[in-house]
Amino acid sequence: MRAALAPGVRLLRAVPRDSRYRGLTLVLTFLSYTSYHLSRKPISIVKSQLHLNCSALGSNPHNDSNSTTWCSWAPFDQDNYKELFGALDNAFLVAYAIGMFISGIFGERLPLRYYLSGGMLLSGIFTALFGFGYFWNIHVLWYFIIVQVCNGLAQTTGWPSVVACVGNWFGKGKRGLIMGIWNSHTSVGNILGSLIAGAWVSSQWGLSFIVPGIIIAVVGIVCFFFLVEHPEDVGCSPPLQHDTSDEKDPEGVTSEDRSTTDPKELNEELEAISFLGALRIPGVVEFSLCLLFAKLVSYTFLYWLPLYIVNVAHFGAKEAGDLSTLFDVGGILGGIFAGLISDYTGGRATTCCVMLVVAAPMLFLYNHVGQNGIGTSIAMLIVCGALVNGPYALITTAVSADLGTHESLKGNAKALSTVTAIIDGTGSVGAALGPLLAGLISPTGWNNVFYMLIAADVLACLLLARVVVKEVRAWYGCMARKRGFQQF
């Protein structure tokens, strides 16, 4: 007697073939970028361990060492340790920002699966090399700087590749919500990175880098074997990137609804878009400049929040790292909320602008009352995380995919990686400036750092003003047409 088909197999067979591959693409790209952010987070956790106040540990066993920093890790045991931490951050972030503009061009011309997998393996190697500095007893600044530069360049392979893959599989209709949920990989990676790094930060901080390095390399190997770049590669229907009528489903359209021309053959005939051509797409410049300031705020929190909590709230390194993950929990909620609202209203820029406006006073409040109690700190971190990371998440995902498949491209799908790289590359300039400015300003007081972050939020909002006005006019025009039809 033959056994009945396993329930799990029956469930898989009940799911449409296109949906199975869409789900696989979402899961693999989610895990990929989770591991990218997981491997970036350890440096912010380990900073407080590299420069310690050693007076509580007893007398100094080394006569030639500073009496209060003898247990710190040279060369970060000097009074200029904040500037050195800023140099480490910027070695990574400047290399990332410069490399991102080039990465998108390569991403349009190379197989994404190879490009993404190779980048993840290299990222794993360079992340682990930073941690090996602990076991090899390296105390030379240039070693850590070089490793950070190489890691920054390697990590530019990630974002254009994953956004291009998801954009190839999902149409515009529910892109904001889907990508808002999917973009939680950024915060999930930060949370996991904080927890993994925190497990060894007080004992063997080298493992705080080596373990994430192994994780990203393993996920890269999995992507090499299973990632599917285009629906056409496995005989699935490509999505509509633009609505042609209200009745059609934007996520999946039957072959009868499409042109007789094979989309894969069409894209092979079209040339990849140039850098200047991508800049001419309406909205690319505005959203890129907005992201510069939005990412400045987000990455300042990413790299300096644990140290801020240690200095202001006087928590230990592990406790500060754990508490800082709440900012990323808020980021998950903010990304989903921003995507849902922008899908419902059709106003990507307006959604970003409103959240940025509200974020400015919330940052002021967090700095002044956020440390009054553990409950207040938890609530404020979640709210600030949602308002800061919501616009950042929306621009780097749904907005990038929208602009990379803009109507002006006339069906050319070879623009997603370049547009994504331009937007995220410009944002990465802000990501480099934020931690640098925080390192320079923090010696004058943390209040000044928060004033800088509030100013950046306001500037980000102002840069979207033209696009917001355009969206508002479109809403009024739509409402006027509806009233006209009703009267008719």
Image (spheres, grey):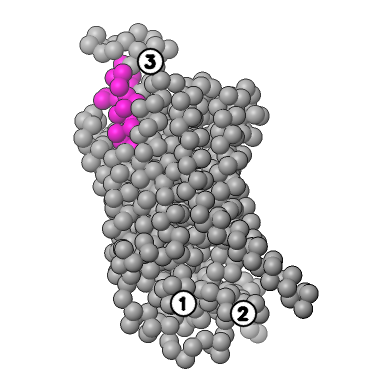
Residue type beneath disc 1: Pro
Query: Could you tell me if the residues under marks 2 and 3 are in contact, i.e. CB atoms within 8 Å?
Result: no
Relative height, residue 455 to residue 9 (above, below): above
Q: Would residue 406 appear left or right of 333 to someone viewing this image? A: left
Quadrant showing the N terminus: bottom right
Which residue is denoted by mark 1 in the rendering?
A: 231
Which residue is denoted by mark 2 in the rendering?
A: 245
Q: Residue at x 45, y 32 (%)?
A: 452
Q: Would residue 15 appear left or right of 114 to someone viewing this image? A: right
Q: Which residues are magenta?
A: 70-89
Which structural element holds mark 1? helix
Q: Position of residue 293 (x, y in %)?
A: 44, 43
Q: Residue at x 32, y 72 (%)?
A: 272
Q: Nearer the viewer, residue 1 or 126?
A: 126
Which structural element holds mark 3? helix
Looking at the image, tell me whether mark 1 or mark 3 is earlier in sequence order. Answer: 3
Q: Nearer the viewer, mark 2 or mark 3?
A: 2
